[in-house]
Image (spheres, rainbow, N blue to C red):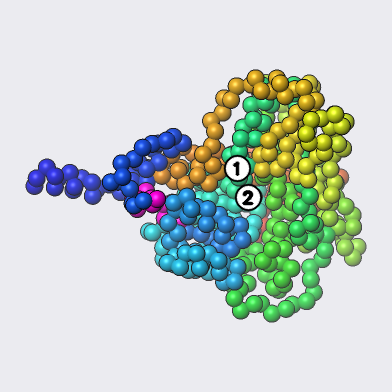
């Protein structure tokens, strides 16, 4: 055999995994690549493409899949229980295999899949993500990571053990504003932070809350597999108030405004201040949304709520109290805003940090931080930019799938963040009580009756 034939033989022994790793080795840097190794003008060479499957191909899931494809992913399979909802993705990727049940998809397509995008309602996140991890696939999952605390802890541990690359869909984690927030807080621009206010206007605005289960039982649309839409959740009759878009307001399927927006909002104080699990959580909810026909309503979330979290002191940092407001409730406008330069009212969704030297606020999704009083801006501009900047939220994950650095919002970060959100929701089941939380044991110390809700019983055929 000639030297050239031996070289060619050696090249053919490289696995797809090795080729993808090599393609991502120079991630987050600029590299000049000779034209002869490219797949054509403006195209990604086949050896560098990540073969991606999408579970949940409509709505946000469809948008995520399209973004991954734009970044170079090869869409090989699409799974959705609703043909109408997924029609846009089916049209955009006509060569992709189509499935309604992701379990069957993995049975048939596992060898062709490198990575999976999970963009379903919250109650499907964990079972779909766990199935992908068991199959050894990288996973991008929309927020919140899971629907229950047990699911969150299980999926986070499984991803770490499998060594797959993961990312949760809190896009603001990759922004410049998020990094400036970290740098300014950690440099002490506003002093020691002991109090944080976070809020969202989503509850009841984009979906209904504080309502009972509907009594009508309309027919299931022919294009929807209602049984698969329910997945692991207990059976109930179909109603359009649940799907395709109303599910966020229902305990069995969604996580309310805190689950929807908390991952975009609470994310930033958790990251900047290195907050772990809270030791205490308490909730206050509106009675008109919590009480229906004389009994507590655990069908849909309350119309409005306040949630209080107490985080113990960390290395070098004091204890912190964080408050979450939703359903039209917000913290008072800081008096310093009356004299501020530029923005003079709180955002509809955002964070307010209260420090010993001043205050800072920003909008959701890693909005650019603004300081109060405005004179602190001069000091902030002197703070060095010590954090690595991101090439982009979606880009991080795709590069990681090719062997690049771990995404910043990988499950080891996103899992504990999601647990904070789920704890706030559990507190709404017993409003007005100061609940002591034991994170290591995944239990409430002083409310054993609530421990039954750290997980939900699955229907037969569904598992983590």
Q: Is residue 448 visible?
A: no
Q: What residue sits 75% from the left and 34% below the top?
A: 361
Coordinates of residue 105 in the picture (x, y in percent): 46, 65
Hey, which quadrant is residue 432 in on the image?
top right
Q: Which mark is residue 269?
A: none
Q: What residue sits 63% from the left and 42% below the top?
A: 172
Q: Is residue 18 left or right of residue 242?
A: left
Q: Is residue 231 visible?
A: yes
Q: What residue sits 84% from the left and 55% below the top?
A: 303
In this picture, is 357 found above or below 7? Answer: above
Q: Which mark is residue 414?
A: 1
Coordinates of residue 48 in the picture (x, y in percent): 37, 48
Q: Pick the quarter of the image with the C terminus.
A: bottom right
Coordinates of residue 447 in the picture (x, y in percent): 78, 45
| Cα gap from disc 1 to disc 2, whole angstroms | 9 Å
Label 1, secondary structure: give it. helix
- The crowd level at tag 1 (other Cα within 10 Å; few <14, some 14-19, many 20+) is many
Q: In the rendered structure, does residue 177 fall within the stretch colored magenta?
A: no
Q: Say whether marks 1 and 2 touch (CB < 8 Å).
A: yes
In this picture, is 152 found above or below 91? Answer: above
Coordinates of residue 161 in the picture (x, y in percent): 47, 43
Badge 1 or badge 2: first in the primary sequence: 2
- The crowd level at tag 2 (other Cα within 10 Å; few <14, some 14-19, many 20+) is many
Residue denoted by label 2: 143
Q: Is residue 254 left or right of residue 39?
A: right
Relative to the observer, which residue lies in front, 435 or 341?
Answer: 341
Relative to the observer, which residue lies in front, 336 or 3?
Answer: 336
Q: Where does the magenta region start and end? A: 42-52
Q: What residue sits 46% from the left and 36% below the top?
A: 28
């Amino acid at each position: 055999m000639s030297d050239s034939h031996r070289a060619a033989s050696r090249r053919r022994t490289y696995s797809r995994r090795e080729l993808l790793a090599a393609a991502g080795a120079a991630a987050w840097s600029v590299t000049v690549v000779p034209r002869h190794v490219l797949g054509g003008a403006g195209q990604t060479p086949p050896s560098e493409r990540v073969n991606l499957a999408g579970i949940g191909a409509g709505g946000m899931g469809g948008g995520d899949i399209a973004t991954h494809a734009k970044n170079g992913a090869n869409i090989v399979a699409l799974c959705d229980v609703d043909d109408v909802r997924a029609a846009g993705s089916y049209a955009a990727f006509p060569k992709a295999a189509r499935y309604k049940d992701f379990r069957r998809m993995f049975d048939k397509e596992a060898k062709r899949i490198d990575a999976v995008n999970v963009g379903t309602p919250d109650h499907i996140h964990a079972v779909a993500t766990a199935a992908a991890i068991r199959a050894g696939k990288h996973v991008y999952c929309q927020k919140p990571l899971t629907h229950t605390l047990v699911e969150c802890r299980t999926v986070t541990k499984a991803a770490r053990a499998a060594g797959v690359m993961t990312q949760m869909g809190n896009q603001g984690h990759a922004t410049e504003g998020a990094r400036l927030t970290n740098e300014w807080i950690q440099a002490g621009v506003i002093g020691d932070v002991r109090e944080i206010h976070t809020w969202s206007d989503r509850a009841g605005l984009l979906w209904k809350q504080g309502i009972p289960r509907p009594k009508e039982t309309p027919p299931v649309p022919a294009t929807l597999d209602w049984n698969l839409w329910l997945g692991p959740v207990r059976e109930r009759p179909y109603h359009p108030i649940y799907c395709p878009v109303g599910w966020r307001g229902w305990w069995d399927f969604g996580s309310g405004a805190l689950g929807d927006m908390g991952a975009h909002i609470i994310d930033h104080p958790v990251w900047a201040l290195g907050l772990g699990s809270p030791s205490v959580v308490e909730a206050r909810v509106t009675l008109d949304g919590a009480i229906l026909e004389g009994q507590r309503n655990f069908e849909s979330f309350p119309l409005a709520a306040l949630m209080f979290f107490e985080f113990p002191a960390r290395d070098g940092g004091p204890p912190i109290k964080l408050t979450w407001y939703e359903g039209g409730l917000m913290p008072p406008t800081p008096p310093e805003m009356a004299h501020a330069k530029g923005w003079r009212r709180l955002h509809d969704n955002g964070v307010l940090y209260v420090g010993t030297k001043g205050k800072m606020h920003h909008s959701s999704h890693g909005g650019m931080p603004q300081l109060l009083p405005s004179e602190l801006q001069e000091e902030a501009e002197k703070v060095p930019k010590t954090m690595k900047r991101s090439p982009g939220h979606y880009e991080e994950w795709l590069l990681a799938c090719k062997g690049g650095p771990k995404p910043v919002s990988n499950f080891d970060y996103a899992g504990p963040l999601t647990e904070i959100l789920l704890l706030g929701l559990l507190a709404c089941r017993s409003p007005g009580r100061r609940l002591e939380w034991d994170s290591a044991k995944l239990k409430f110390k002083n409310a054993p009756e609530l421990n039954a809700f750290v997980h939900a019983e699955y229907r037969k055929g569904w598992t983590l």
